[in-house]
Amino acid sequence: MGFINYDVNRYTPRQMVVIPLVLLILSLAVLGYNMATTGMPVTPGMDFSGGTAVTVFTSDSPDSLRATFSGYPLISIGEGVNNGKYLKFGPMDDDSLQSLATLIDERYPDAKIDQIGASFGETLQHQAAVALVLSFIGMAIVVFVAFRTFVPSGAVVLSAFADIVMTAAVMTVVGIELSLPTTAALLMLIGYSVDSDILLTMRVLKRQGKLDEKLAGAFRTGIIMTTTTLAAVAAMWAVTYFGNVPVIPEISAVLFIGLLIDMMNTWLTNAGIIKWYMLGRGTK
Amino acid sequence: MNKKELIALLKNWQVALLVILVIASLFLIYPHVEDEKLTTNLQYGLDLSDGTWLQMEFQAEVVGFETERPVGEFLADLQKKLDAEIYLVEEDKMEIRTFYTREQLETAFEESGGRLTSYEQGVSKETAEQVKKILEDKLNALGTKDAKVNPLTGLSGVSHYVRVELAGVSLSQAKDIVGKQGRFEIRIHTTGNATEHILYGDAINTVGVPSQNPPGSNSWGVSFTLTEEGAIQLRDGAIQYGATTNPDQHYLEMLLDGRVVYSAPLSPDLAAKLQVDPIRELYASTGTGQVALNDAKNLEIHLRAGALPVEVKVAGSGYVPAALSDYFKTMAVVAFIIAVIAVGIVVFLRYREPAIVLPMIGINLSEIVILLGIAAVIQQQLDLAAIAGLIAVLGTGIDQLVIITDEILHEGRVPSPNIYQKRLTRAVGIIMVSAATVIIAMLPLALMDLSTLRGFAIITILGVLIGVLITRPAYGKIIMAILSK
């Protein structure tokens, strides 16, 4: 692959780790700032904050839609390609919801409706948070059991942690909300981002040969691995985003961002730490 | 590869297993043309098949308690104070069938001489099952063809929500059918227009379908039976208020949500019998003709399902129209094909050798076919999130094939069988660890009731398992056969 000219062996461990470390601190700052101002590290989507979303394909202008739904707590109207309109409503009681559903049924029978009550959203949010924590702990246990040495395992877990934190920060910056689908993507990232880290660690710890060669070999394999996944995810994103399909674009966008960040964390953070570890061990 | 080599390869059990599973899966998925549309045995989730989902929250709670008083007295006291139906679920746990906050209950418990020890909104498993049955009966009676009712039960055994999925029904219709659950009650006229409570819907045991009585008379009605307790309540009430001696002055009324849905006197025959014994088999007549038949149908629904034991509130809902779900399905297939092509291009750029790239893609697709085959067997619904999982499995599946290929190709092209086995083992080691992390990471999602994401988690976990157990070992054998040429 010609476009990647990075040579894992050119830099010292300290040089390698410094960039991701700065980015990690920045990311934590972004999430911390969000937490302080809004109470949530990442902007929660409708799944967690409650509300009603309506997807409809219509040539009606936003203004006429606004007039149609003037009796309901309409928050925003988004426009997509092919006349796709995304209407967001705030929380309302069962009766208003029923009359809204009836109105939509009459005017736009082909509209997709999603509604989440505020307290249900809170429950979902709580469960999603628990799922994230549990899955991270589970992943860390598997890694520690697999390698049984502290520094290499710690490096893998740290780089997975950095993946999640940085991805969450990028989500905030580019405006991807935390929803059920994006939570699923983050969970998947916890599982998959360690793929290349495990390859790297296994190759370096368990294979015979010079460290330089092992690192270069692992890098060659690792990059192609991540690139294939990136290709699948990018294709999935492009088709569904331009095709106005919900759910999948959010999942693939988060996976795409996460995998890019993972490339950096694997080949800078994790590779840096494991190189330092191996060099230190060699001199003893 | 010549014929002989191919046969030798197929004799390898891992390769043979893969081939058998792919063929079996194709049969299980069973793609065929029906009504000029390509149909398969795959189940689609609600965002890929038109219909509505409703998630409803039980307006009730299961609480733990302590009291020094006899439990019966304590409960009776609470029942009066809270004006709610209360049932003992376990020795120290009760179900309160009206919504109260923890604080409200704490006060009430103290005043009644007890203490609240735990609080969880929802109903006991038994009640949840009852609700499920009632809703299912009701939906089936209305002829809703594809209805699913699932209580979502937490680890503590308390169900907080019940989820209903209805194919081909719009959201407003669905809410009409399900969301507004009534409370069924039988009352009896005392003097003038005043009425007294006799029993609630839970005293009704079984309900028959509309029938003619006598048969062939075109005079319609619905038979139903009461529980033993209910029968006694009815007899006592009828005697107490004089319905047995003067039925025409003391009509029996059936109410749904306080609205009268049926009102009639006891038949002279029944009145006489009730005077002597509790009667469990009853028949509510609605008159003669087509109108009476329709009335009887409605009455049946009211009797059968009018009464949910617990009030429910809509917590979340959604609707996908048919046009959109068909479109999503098409787009999902397009996304999948483009993803396969994209992955193929990347792998080709790396190896520039069709003899490696084609088996890789082939194995990858076979993995997806087997995954879909299993999904068809276990009736796992495919929704948009699950499709995303499927495509991600495609991307990561290739990853691991790359690991195997690179391990084997490491230092020179053709390793001896001995070295090859060693390298394959090492590659499988890497794959096992990363597969374990994915499975562990997805497990919480598969086990929790984050409803819509379960499909995603289950598909991902299955995909990883199939890859590790079946397709990757087979790929190892195949690629070895190809490379050693």
Image (spheres, helix red, strand yellow):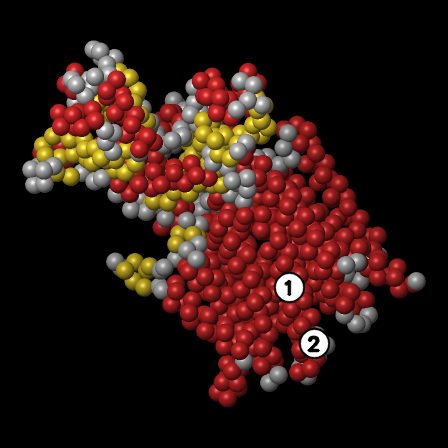
Q: Nearer the viewer, residue A251 or A49?
A: A49
Residue closer to the observer: A102 or B376:
B376
Q: Residue furthest bottom?
A: B4
Q: Classify residue A227 by image quadrant.
A: bottom right
Residue at the image position 55 percent from the left and 22 percent from the top: B69
Q: Check disc 2 and give the amino acid type.
A: Lys
- The picture places residue A150, in percent across and down from the top left corner, at 80, 55
Find residue B401 and report its horizontal and vertical position in percent.
60, 68
Residue A266 image offset from top left, x and y in percent:
72, 55
- The crowding category of the residue bearing disc 2, from other C-alpha atoms within 10 Å (few below 14, some 14 to 19, many at least 20), is few
- Report helix, strand or loop for mark 2: helix
Residue denoted by label 2: B422
The subunit letter for the residue under badge 2 reads B
Residue A53: tell me if it is visible: no
| Chain where mark 1 sits | B
Between the residue at mark 2 and the residue at mark 1, the CA separation in whole angstroms equals 15 Å
Q: Closest to the observer: A47 or B216?
A: B216
* Quarter residue B66 falls in: top right
Local secondary structure at mark 1: helix
**Quarter of the image with the C terminus of chain A in it:** bottom right
Instruction: Classify mark 1: residues with Cα within 10 Å, few (<14), some (14-19) or many (20+).
Output: some
Check the image and name the residue furthest to the right. A284
| Amino acid found under the numbered disc labelled 1 | Met
Q: Residue B178 — which label?
A: none
Residue at 54% across / 48% down in the picture? Answer: B447
Q: Residue at x 27, y 60 (%)?
A: B34
Q: Which of the 4 image quadrants contains residue A89? A: top left
Asked if disc 2 and disc 1 are in contact, CB closer than 8 Å, the reply is: no
Residue pictured at 58% horizontal, 41% vertical = A128
Q: Give the vertical position of B403 relative to A275 (above or below).
A: below
Left or right: A141, with A42 as reference point? right
Residue A23 lies left or right of residue B207; in this view the side is right
